[in-house]
Amino acid sequence: MVRCDLVKLVSRIFPENDASRALCRALGFREVGVYEKHGQLDGVWKDCVIVERHLLNVGGSGAAPPDTPHRSPAAGPPVRRLRRPSRRSRRR
């Protein structure tokens, strides 16, 4: 049997899916950014919100990292936009 020590769970959610975003917040996930035009729904490429939940801190105690911000759900989490590299930079 192989043992895997997971450190973090990561997922993506469509921005308009308020129920999933609320559930993830309630389960301890935080929104850390947005992938632009990352997921396709009904033939349309849409942005996706990136959510993550730390399972271990660097010391391995099992607690969330100390720098994880605790924010009110009403305030809404900060969201950074992540951009894909331009085609020109990928060719180099």
Image (cartoon, rainbow, N blue to C red):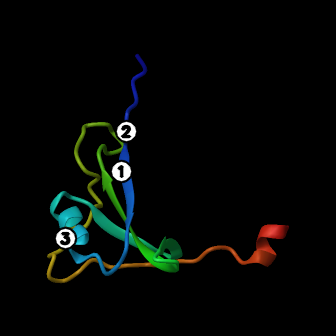
Picture layout, residue 13 above or below residue 66: below
Which residue is located at x 77 percent, y 69 percent?
90
Which residue is located at x 52 percent, y 77 percent?
43
Numbered disc 1: secondary structure:
strand
Q: Residues within 10 Å of mark 1 (few under 14, many from 20)?
A: few
- Give the farthest residue toward the front: 42
Number of disc labels: 3
User: Which residue, given by chain and number where applicable, does mark 1 sit on?
Assistant: 9
Residue placed most toward the observer, 44 or 20: 44
The reply to whether residue 81 is visible in this rendering is no
In this picture, residue 43 sits left or right of residue 54: right
Picture layout, residue 4 above or below residue 24: above
Image coordinates of residue 42 in percent, x first then y, are: 46, 77
Which residue is located at x 15 percent, y 63 percent?
26
Residue 22 marker: 3
| Amino acid under disc 3 | Ala
- Give the farthest residue toward the right: 92
Sequence-wise, the earlier of marks 1 and 3 is: 1
Image coordinates of residue 19 in percent, x first then y, are: 20, 72
Q: Nearer the viewer, mark 2 or mark 3?
A: 3
Residue placed most toward the observer, 71 or 42: 42
Cβ–Cβ under 8 Å for marks 1 and 2: yes
Quadrant assignment for the N terminus: top left
